[in-house]
Image (cartoon, rainbow, N blue to C red):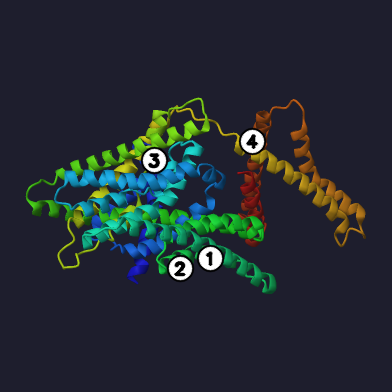
Amino acid sequence: MHSIEVVLVMLLAVVVSGYLTRVLQRWLPLPLPVVQIALGATIAGVFGRGVTLDPHLFFVLFLPPLLFLDGWRIPKSGLFRDRGVILQLALGLVVFTVLGAGLLIHWMIPAMPLAVAFALAAILSPTDPVAVSSIAARAPIPSRVMHILEGESLLNDASGLVCFRFAVAAALTGGFSLLSASLTFLWVALAGVAVGAALTIAINRGHALVSRVFGEEAGTPILISLLTPFGAYLLAEQIGASGILAAVAAGITMSYVELSGRALATTRVQRAAVWDTVQFSLNGIIFVLLGEQLPWIVDRAVSTVREAGHVTPWWLVVYVLAIYAGLFALRFAWVWVTLWIALSRSGARRRLPATRLVAAMSLAGVRGAITLAGVLTLPLALYDGTPFPARDLAIFLAAAVILISLLLGSLVLPRLLRGLTAPVEGEGDREMDLARHEGAVAAVAAVERAQHALPGAKSDPDLYASAAVRVMALYQDRLRREAGGGIDAEELRRADDAERALRIAAVAAERECIYGLARHRRISDEIARRLVRDLDLLEARYR
């Protein structure tokens, strides 16, 4: 019963945080993740206790579906086009950060062993895809830059966690093997990707075979899509591979599997709504849980430095600011060099990256739930039974860096990007125009075939011919407008926007009229629901 109450309180906190964010917009425009963290800390402070976070359970319950969805929805063309830059950020930057930040932390805090400092730097190196998405919702990040940041955040978790695992092992045993670490990373990454892709293909082919023979219930495909990331994650972890990369690979594979078009239209609409709800709920619960951990993390860190006796608790603030500044400087330098190499190879006129753009990409590298859950897995004791050195201090520093990166990313990034000119990508518009044209041609051809092939067409050809004319009118009008000479493409898009706004207004008025008829009992509520559902689908098409 206690677990059920905790879940309900978490969901209620997510709902309340949405209202609080909108209320605070008038006076203090704080991003939603920061409000959720503050609300979680308030809940823990008022009730005197928070939810005990089991890091392993956290990884299993929250990360697979969110990473799966990010992999599913991320634009694949951008991911593969900028794969060189993404891999340099996801692999090279992680190692660079571990070495640079680890040495900085050990230099500032000599009481923290070098291996523990490297472990802290390793778990601070991955950017969080959930946090990056939350920041992007408020900042006008150019689309290509956003694709690079999303791709980086999806792939750098594995490299960061592998570095973290070996740093912890070095702290426990006092030894480290570069060859063993390299071979382990290759196995973790390659096996994780293979498991995720293979399992997704197998599940979907098996489902297609069974449903083709025996049929299926309406909700079965949706439930299968929800279970797939958990299966990929658990199977990969069982064989010692990266469950995180398995979930990401499963999502990317799912985006290609669905191109088969087997799913029904109603299934796709319902599945999108279910996944949007899951994403909103889990994102919110993650940040609320993070806030609930803050009071005891701060309390233990203060106790640790007081027991040391040679430093005041206020030095914790200095440590946090210095670590964040070091992480920012390391990321800024690596991003600048990476973009400079990319510009030089592309033969672009501008050979030096824009400083504001590099600074924006550095600020957008926010830390989040993966960092917190990872640092909480630090062992309580060494093999000889002595307490793990500086464990509470490392947890506090990681949590504080998460909070600062979210605050600065949310508050400074929109101002930094204001007025920043970025190359306009017209590829998306061209692809949309191409898809609409080819789709209209295919639709007209299909209607022409169907008006003669349908069972009732022979008995009443005039009726079907008239219906075909009405159906084809919309597509033929689109083709005529696209073929119209001398008409600017931008002018056509503005006309489409105007038509879309008028159609939405008409649908809204029709829906309100139906609700009025139902309220006055002139039609039944069942009829009202059916008509409103049709109007909702129509409006969703125009949105």
Q: Residue 272, position in %: x, y?
A: 56, 55
Considering the image in quadrants, where does the N terminus appear?
bottom left
Q: How crowded is mark 4: few (under 14 residues within 10 Å), some or many (20 or more)?
A: few
Foreground residue among 140 and 501: 140
417 over 517 or under it: above or below: above
- x then y, percent, for residue 313: 13, 47
The three-letter amino acid code for the residue at tag 3 is: Ala
Q: What residue type is labelled 1?
A: Leu
Label 4–label 2 contact, CB within 8 A: no
Where is mark 2, residue-wise? 235
Which badge, 3 or 4, is on the more N-terminal residue?
3
SS of the residue at dot 1?
helix
Q: In this view, does 520 lie to the left or right of 450?
A: left
Q: Are marks 3 and 4 in contact (CB under 8 Å)?
A: no
- Assign a secondary structure to mark 4: helix
Q: How far apart are marks 4 and 2 (CA)?
A: 47 Å
Residue that carries the numbered disc 4 in the rendered image:
497
As drawn, which residue projects farthest toward the bottom? 214
Q: Which mark is residue 364?
A: 3
Q: What residue type is labelled 2?
A: Leu
Instruction: Note whether residue 357 is visible.
Output: yes
Distance between the alpha carbons at the discs numbered 1 and 3: 33 Å
